[in-house]
Structure formats: C-alpha cells, structure tokens
Amino acid sequence: TWGSSATRGLFFVFEGLDRSGKSTQSKKLEEYLSKAGRSVKWMCFPNRKTPIGTAIDLYLRRQLELPDEAVHRLFSANRWEMAKSIVEDLRAGTTIICDRYAFSGVAYSAAKGLDFSWCQAPDRGLPCPDGIFFLHIDEKVGAARSNFGDERYENAEMQAKVRAQFKDPRLRANVHWKDVNGARDMEVIHAEIRSAVEVIRQEDQENRQRAIPR
Ligand code: 2DT
Ligand code: MG
C-alpha cells in the first residue's frame, strides 16, 4: 500500500559553535511546529541524563579526566543510547528537533587533533537527519556574544579550532545541510528556518508519492 508512512516524522538537527543561537532557534521551531498541531519532540546532545551522559557531564564540568579518544566514543554512545527511541518516534509520526548531533561530535574531537574520519566512524548507522541547520556567526560576533562559562571547550582558542573543523566538506557530504547566518535578528532567522522546514516536508511528501507501491 501507499502506507501510513505518509505520517512519518521529520528529523531536524541544529549545529554550530557555542552561543550561535542553536538552543533559541531549535526551541522556537519546536514551539512553531507544536502550535501548528504537529507532534514534536525537542532533544539535545549530549543528553546528560543517561548513564553515559552522566559521565560526559562530569567530564565537561572537569570533574572527570578521560582520554580524548574515550570521551569521543562516549559522546557517540550517548547518541546510540537514544537511537532506537528516535527511530520509533519518527515512525510514529513525531518530528524530532535536536540541539547538536554527530556533527558536533566530529568537529569538537577533530579540533582536539583526532583524525577526522576516525571521528566519523562510530556514528555511522545512526538515524540520519532530514535537515541540518548550521548556525554560523563570524568571529567578531561570536567574541561579542561570548561570556563563556567554565566548562571544557568554552574558550576562544578551542572555539576557533572547532570553527575551522565545521568548514570541512566531509561533514556536509550526503546530508541535507543548510548554512544559516546566525548574526541576524532572531525572528528573521526563525522565519528562514521555518520555510526551509516546509520545503523539506514538501519534498519528503513528493518523494513518498513517487515511490512505487509495494
Ligand atoms: P552543550 O554546550 O551544547 O551542552 O555541549 N560536544 C557535543 C562534543 O564534544 N561532542 C559531541 O558529540 C557533542 C554532542 C560541544 C557541551 C559541549 O560538548 C561538545 C559542547
Ligand atoms: Mg556549551
């Protein structure tokens, strides 16, 4: 049949440096979609509430030291902890909006000097987002917004390295990646993301209609 898959949820990811507006924009999109009557769930990575997330939280708050390779694997395992429920939600028609995903995983670890494709390997096979919104702000705007806390990675030197890694085309390969200028008015950015979401939804429905019925 043409299937109830017409109600599949979509999976959107927000990526970017610290203070690029990911949390604000991802929550605005959640609010918009839920007001429009869609079933929607917001989540973030790291998910500090899971068993593995607890260790990650300690690491980020500098209460636990771990080798870079080990913590990289933990960040990935933290996504695998949630993978099954993500797939189930999407199948059930719930749209998922996620603040950071595997792309942050690669960019932050590669910024510490780990090999880029080694960093990509453990995330292979995870649910693939239907769209990734990469919020970018130039260095000057980023510095003005900064007022960093004291978690690991929250310093200008690390941010500059992460910024460089996010430019690597291997991150954008085979995914629907949209660069969004995050230096503009919050509502202008939100409107742009909203219309991109509608385009992706439209495309998804058209693809579904073209599919040969089984
Ligand atoms: P938040 O500031 O968003 O809580 O993130 N990070 C995140 C990684 O190094 N690898 C990952 O896989 C993910 C998802 C980015 C806390 C920090 O954790 C970094 C910032
Ligand atoms: Mg942070």
Image (tube, rainbow, N blue to C red):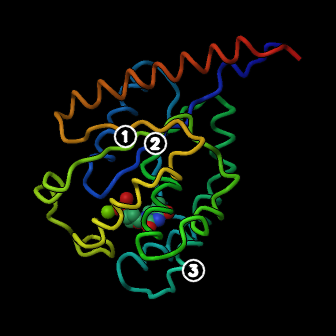
Q: Earlier in the sequence, mark 2 or mark 3?
A: 2
Q: Residue at x 47, y 70 (%)?
A: 109
Q: Which residue is mark 2?
A: 42
Q: Amino acid at mark 2?
A: Trp
Q: Quadrant of the N terminus?
A: top right
Figure label count: 3
Q: Quadrant of the C terminus?
A: top right
Q: Nearer the viewer, residue 43 or 159?
A: 159
**Mark 1 or 3: the one toward you:** 3
Task: Kindly give the residue lying farthest to the left in the view shown.
Answer: 144
Q: Residue at x 67, y 31 (%)?
A: 92
**Mark 1 or 2: the one toward you:** 1
- How far apart are the two marked residues, 1 and 2, measured between alpha carbons? 8 Å
Q: Which residue is mark 3?
A: 70
Q: Residue at x 30, y 71 (%)?
A: 158
Q: Earlier in the sequence, mark 1 or mark 3?
A: 1
* Disc 1 residue crowd, few under 14, some 14–19, many 20+, Cα 10 Å: many
Q: Which residue is mark 1?
A: 26
Q: Nearer the viewer, residue 21 or 28?
A: 21
* Disc 3 residue crowd, few under 14, some 14–19, many 20+, Cα 10 Å: few
Can you tell which quarter of the image residue 74 is in? bottom right
* SS state under label 1: helix
